Image (cartoon, rainbow, N blue to C red):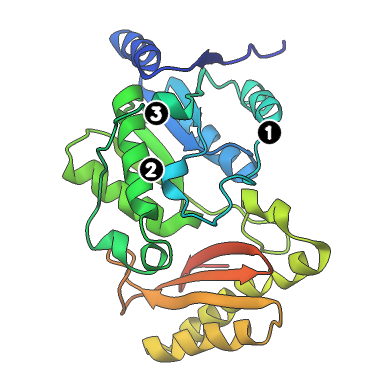
Amino acid sequence: MAADPPLRVTTPGDLRTWSEASRREGLRVGLVPTMGALHAGHVSLVRRARQECERTAVSIFVNPLQFRPGEDFERYPRRLGADLEVLRAERVDAVYLPAVETMYPSGATTRVRVAELDAVLEGACRPGHFEGVATVVLKLFEAARPDRAYFGQKDAQQAAVVTRLARDLDTGVEVVVCPTVREPDGLALSSRNTFLGQDERRAALCLVRALRAANAAYGAGERDAAALRAELHQVLAAEPLARVDYAEVVDDSTFQPPGSLAVLAVRIGATRLIDNHHLGAPL
């Protein structure tokens, strides 16, 4: 039997009403926040939510607050029809589709910061980005009132910011971070992969090659952060199309060295890609 389409909700009040009705029935609510352009990585989050919660909601909202001027907000892929088909096939219960004016009405000036963690690496390269992430996530938590919210390890620093926010502000939301999903050749799935031309797609594999090189060194006993960082940079430097924003080995809670989480942000042509790996784990 074909699955029913998910309930489409466009206001925070309606999402809250749906969620509270579910909870009154004793049903756990899982939330998967997304910006759409859904791929197998998003689907893995949805499936985890459906395994652990009786009701699952997915939000689709391209959040302008987390884009700086000159970034790819306008060209970020939007394909709502295809996304809704994915969510129907995955038997999602509700999809939240707020307009920008609903999320940020005229005169709304409140912003949320997770201090220190939002100022390094990705936060340093994209000032204000994590303020936008934290603000929209808190608004989604307030609207959906979920028991659990699901994020991908591919965006490791974002997941850390959200985890800290949920804890510090006593939201009662359990943040679940799910493994990165990769293509067969190792490239981490990303909605931005669609921007890559054929040559750029091949060049983008330098990210996972760099992570594998550092992982091999770590597996052979290397623990010096500078040496592990050098492994990352050596591989990336060999790719002519790659421009490195950062390639570091950091602690996975502070995103400061030393640590064993290798994190990368690399521009391949006009497309900026990120990836990471806990050194010592299979890759």
Query: Observer-nearest residue: 118 or 74?
Result: 74
Query: Observer-nearest residue: 175 or 193?
Result: 193
Q: How much space separates mark 2 and mark 3, taking CA atoms?
A: 24 Å
Quarter-of-image position of residue 256:
bottom left
Three-letter amino acid code at the position of disc 1 = Arg
Residue 66: x %, y % from top left: 43, 48
Which residue bears the numbered disc 3? 103
Quarter-of-image position of residue 227:
bottom left
Which residue bears the numbered disc 2? 176
Q: Nearer the viewer, mark 2 or mark 1?
A: 1
Q: Is residue 170 above or below residue 68?
A: above
Q: Dot 1, how many residues are within 10 Å of its Cα: few (below 14), some (14-19), or many (20+)?
A: few
Query: Observer-nearest residue: 206 or 134?
Result: 134
Residue 2: x %, y % from top left: 72, 12
Question: In what quadrant of the picture does the C terminus appear?
Answer: bottom right
Q: Is residue 145 visible?
A: no
Residue 164: x %, y % from top left: 25, 50
Q: Secondary structure at mark 3?
A: helix
Compared across the picture, whether 95 is left or right of 31 comes to right
**Residue in the image at 38% along x and 51% along y:** 159
Q: Nearer the viewer, mark 2 or mark 3?
A: 3
Q: Is residue 30 above or below residue 228?
A: above
Q: Secondary structure at mark 1?
A: loop
Which residue bears the numbered disc 1? 79
Three-letter amino acid code at the position of disc 3 = Met
Q: Dot 2, how many residues are within 10 Å of its Cα: few (below 14), some (14-19), or many (20+)?
A: some
Q: Nearer the viewer, mark 3 or mark 1?
A: 3
**Residue in the image at 62% along x and 86% along y:** 237
Three-letter amino acid code at the position of disc 2 = Val
